[in-house]
Image: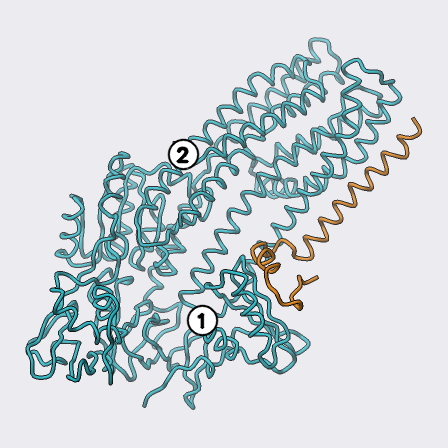
Chain colours: A orange, B cyan
Amino acid sequence: MNIVMFLAPFSLGLGLLAVAAFWWSLKAGQYEDPAGDAARILVEDPEDRPIA
Amino acid sequence: MAVIYDAARTDLGAFLNRHDDGGARLDLLVPDARCAGCLSKIEREILALPGVASARLNLTQKRLTVEFGKGGEDPAAVVAALERLGYPATPYDPGRAQDAHDREGRRLVLALAVAGFGVMNTMMFSVPIWAGLFGQELGPATRTLMMWFSGVVGAPCALYAGLPFFRSAWRSLKARRANMDVPISIGVLLTLAISFSETVLGGRDAYFDAAVSLLFLLLIGRWLDHRLRARASSAAADLLALQAPSAIVMGPDDALVARPVAEVRPGDRLLLRPGERVPVDCRVLSGASELDNSLLTGETAPVAVSLGGDCRAGALNLSGTLQLVAVARSEDSAVAAIARLVEAGAQAKSRYVRLADKAAGLYVPVVHTVALLTFAGGWALGLGPREALIRAVAVLIVTCPCALGLAVPAVQITASARLFRRGVLVKSGAALERLAEVDHVVFDKTGVLTEGRPRLVDAMPRTLAMAAPLARVSRHPLARALADAAGSGPLASEVTEHAGQGVEGTIDGRRARLGRAAFVGVDGAGSETELWFGFEGDIKIRFRFADSLRPDALETLEALAARGLSVEILSGDVPGAVGRVAEALGVAAWRAGCTPQDKAARMDELAAAGRRVLMVGDGLNDAAALAKAHAAMAPGSALEASQNAADLVFSGERLEPVVAAFDVARSARRRALENFGFAALYNVVAAPAAMLGLVNPFVAAIAMSGSSLIVTLNALRTGLRR
């Protein structure tokens, strides 16, 4: 039973990590231009990279 | 004095967004950017310009954001560079409303993410509890522990994810009204409270997972609805930015300054190129040209203007460059009276009660009465207050308003996505609901039933081939129509264009003229819908033009009639032209010479007779009627005021989208009603079960997600053709 006391918070932590990652990606504007991001990987120029 | 427009010399300072650190930002709309090639070319070239710190093209919204370094901004150079690359660009003011809209969207997405996290992780603790319900080995102490876990995770998530609902419920309560969010908020808060008290008292029923998943499903519906409106409003804003971006004002030393139309003052001198619209009411200072008033009055024939002539805002300049002096501000221009009519119509429309709200009006009192009866009845019949309260809460949970909150937005977003692919822009979900109820269609003639531009009628191929080389080098719309009819071929040389008169050039060594009767050397007044052509000293040939019907106008009207809709034409044009169109299309009911007020009055008349009218119009003279009609559509070529007043905007050469929109709207209504029917059926089964205490947290979770899944799948069928 003791293992639950360890695993439950651990899995919650993982879940919170996912929410934090999503929150970050939202703030960073990663959903602003899906068409452009899809096109950018085709652009040859090495200087072109997604903005942080 | 000739003033030549040069993109690189025009001051676009009014569209710069200055930062505190001395830099500035310029937003441009680049509608022709489509692919990775455009993207890299544009960004590379613009970044190479002096003073540009960064250039970023958003391919989804077709917007280019250029950041200038300190003091080095030259926005005109950016526009000129884009034009050189082959991408016409329009300065764009992103506006505050858009930002507010985006913030709202982000808040919803974040609430959705938190609710999603809550659902998954609360469920993790709920599954052992459910297993305990089915006789698996689970001691009371472990169960209580699991309930505590799910409460600690679920309750904060539910409180955060419920904020949009709580806020809206509070607002409507303050206004002494009850909207859908009031019962949702009551249900969620009551569920959380009961679940906590059960956990503390060591009970069996905790509904933390149900509360969070209810919010999760409702937030999906809320977010879909938001996206529908956000996408429509940004697409509409793009169309409008392309149309009336700015006026080119001439400074004292003839320097050209682009200024937002709202900032043009009476007395300003303006430069108007062919193909542009008159920004405000003006008088001509110099130059000669023809104006197309068709969007203002519905008249097809262009009107010639020269020194001292009046130009009304919204008229399209056809042939020559004009210098104008503004005589009114934008808000005082001839359009102001129409704008007031539009406003009145829009207010009437906002009183329309949406389907989901109608259903909510039925649902809320019934469900709350049933829950209250369960509590009172259960207590009276000897259940004890605690058990009676749990059953009442179970009733509230299983009769969750998912069908209302999720099913209708899901239907409407599916419908509008299908229409979007066919070139129809739906501005709101309510617009689709109103369109489905329509039983009478009123069309404007010019630009709606007809193409709104001239086309050559019955010319002989030989004469056409003779005049074509000259027509191909002219910008005049009649000459363009002639060139279109002739196809590609040789061009005339040594061409000079005489604004408002015609074009002169050399074909196979002979001088020839194409233009007005007097210019070519024919006596008589001539007409605005004809063009004369002749070699020097030779006979003169006449070409006649007419505004032709859209290619599928007849089919469209037949398709509408087949759906049981009556059709009527209201036009501002002369009776002869309207009558010909009505006859060609087999429409018996038509009126010509209508003023904007006439059209609006006719809408009131039809509404008073109990008809639900769809108005399809493009001109400023239709704007008031569009706003007053039960539902309204405008083509993408329509003026700003008309597009604002319309519920749906369709693009392209064809009229068929009107029928498509109507079909999809009816299909959406059918799906929505089916979903309501399903929800009612489900509640008829679930509510008594909950009253009898047959519902435990596991059953509630299955029933809730199952019903939401079914209504969503049904929604996806919207607009599918059999």
Where is B119 relative to B503, above or below?
Answer: above
Query: In percent of the image, x 65 and y 32: which residue is there?
Result: B214
Q: Secondary structure at mark 2?
A: helix
| B176 displayed left or right of B283 | right
Q: Residues within 10 Å of mark 2 (few under 14, many from 20)?
A: many
The picture quadrant where one finds residue A9 is top right
Asked if both marks, 2 and 1, belong to the same chain, the answer given is yes
Residue at x 89%, y 21% (from the top left corner): B141
Residue designated by label 2: B667
Residue B540 percent across, percent down from the top left: 8, 76
Instruction: Decide which of B346, B93 is in the foreground and name it.
Output: B93
- Residue at screen point 20% across, 67% down: B482
Question: Residue B553 at x, y = what percent?
Answer: 24, 48
Q: Would you place residue B65 above or below residue A7 in this image?
A: below
| Dot placed on the residue nearer the N-terminal end, 2 or 1 | 1
Q: Quadrant of the N terminus of chain A?
A: top right
Q: Height in image: B395 above or below B276?
A: above
What's the chain of the residue with tag 2?
B
Residue B665 got which mark?
Answer: none
> Which residue type carries mark 1?
Gly
Give the quadrant of the C terminus of chain A. Answer: bottom right
* Image location of residue B41, percent across then percent down: 54, 69
Q: In the rendered structure, which amino acid carries the disc numbered 2?
A: Ser
Nearest the eye: A42 or A13: A42
Which labelled disc corresponds to residue B86? 1
Q: Chain of mark 1?
A: B
Q: CA distance from mark 2 to mark 1?
A: 42 Å
User: From the viewer's perspective, is B622 left or right of B16?
Assistant: left
